[in-house]
Image (tube, rainbow, N blue to C red):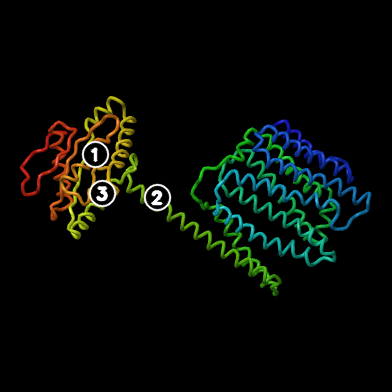
Amino acid sequence: MKRYALVAALAIAAYQLIPSGGWWESGWQVAIGYLGVAGILAGARRLPRRERLPWWCFAFGLAANVTGIPVSIYAIDVLGIDSLPGPADPMFLLLYPACGLGMAILIRRREPRHNWTALVDAATITTGFGLLAWVYVIKPVAVGQDIDMLGRAVQAAYPIGDLLLLAMLTRLLRGGGPRGPAFWWIAGSLIAFLVGDLAWVVIGDLGSTGVALEDTQWVHRCIDMVFLVAYTLFGIGALHGDAREVGSVAPRQPARLGRGLLVLLAAASLIAPGLLMVQLAQGQVRDGWAIAICCTVLFLLVVVRMAQLVREIERQAATVRDLARRDELTGLPNRRVWNEELPRALELARRDRSPMSVALLDLDHFKIFNDTYGHPAGDRLLKEASAAWHGALRAVDLLARYGGEEFVVLLPDVSEDGARQIVERVLAATPQGQTFSAGIAVWDGSETPEELVTRADAALYESKAGGRNRVTVAPPVDSRPEMSHPAA
């Protein structure tokens, strides 16, 4: 790849030194252009078959465009055909759909899911600059020249093709996926094509000064060199070692609105009102309808973009809320959720006059398990146990992680016997041959959530003191004996 780049760079630099004459210049351009095509094909051949298609599209577009150079010279110098459209125009124009298709394939492979945010950003930028293209390039050639309809259509097709490349390039840059050297070589090539076309447009708008510049050999050749660089960069990108990464799938990322992108979007959105102010200052609004349509489209795109940002913020806020309410290890509701749900459940039980029970579960000898098998094994046990317990509970029950190896269960519509049966079923489901101690408290209809959990906790310590691997139901409030908690 380095030798290829060196040869191409020397050939492009030597373009300024070759003798004057159409065939010398066109021959040099064709040689460098086909060198770029050869580089693309050689690089694509090293890739897996399924990754070659976008590169083949690029090679086809460049080959057609390069072939148009000698065809144009032959048509003018030999056949005397200098009208528009000429025999070379279809070949020149094939560059745009071919490269656009290649980029579309890359975008699709890099982002299998539709990235509507990137699409809206690309549409906004293209719409803003498209208005400039219409006012200063497309409209003058479409309605201001004394040529037939087909000639006007062909001449307008060139700036429209540039807009297509701008849209696809913006979409490619705005999307996700790896951005190694090969990616940037492709982007650089497309930018070079756009810069070269823009240079000819600017020179064409300068009137007699532009004609003088076009007749100046070094100026003319400098612009030609921009296109030669564009041909070469595609070949360098294809030959680079990370060319196969260009079509790799991008990990899904949240939409971001960086400062540079924000400035670009703002500039594109201000083109229409800025152009209107310029024409008002000149005393005549010549493109009122175009400006009005562009403003309307840009306004709608900005609204859509704002809606996307709001939805993304809401989604991220919902994710943050969910993370704040979920235990990171087990995925169960955490203590925050438990403290919110228990008072609500007790109030519902009071209103419906239904029983309500609470159970505290504590894995037996969990510290010994951790010391014996390691903390990763302990984490796996907690995850497996919580999943198994959740499957053994009823759909209406709430299992939450209370802290460490301790869990808490809310058991609606069950009293002592039903609660014991459910917890014993959960105990039997404990994985890896492990057990837990449990304490159950049945709500008396008046005690606070803290008092209810305290009774369940006292029953849990009684289970531990009694030898573990057992379920203890706390006595009713009026019959509770005075007791002290044994050491865990």
Please give the label number shown on residue 256. none
Foreground: 272 or 76? 76
The residue indicated by pointer 1 is 425
The alpha-carbon separation of the residues under discs 1 and 2 comes to 33 Å
The residue indicated by pointer 3 is 338
The alpha-carbon separation of the residues under discs 1 and 3 comes to 22 Å
Label 1 residue SS:
helix
Please state which of the two labelled residues, at mark 1 or mark 3, is closer to the viewer.
Answer: 1
How packed mark 3 is, by other alpha carbons closer than 10 Å (few <14, some 14-19, many 20 or more), is many
Q: Is 8 drawn above or below residue 69 in the view shown?
A: above
Residue at 76% across, 44% down? 62
The N terminus - image quarter: top right
Residue at 71% across, 41% down? 56
Side of 291 where 324 appears, left or right: left
How packed mark 2 is, by other alpha carbons closer than 10 Å (few <14, some 14-19, many 20 or more), is few
Q: How many marks?
A: 3
Label 2 residue SS:
helix
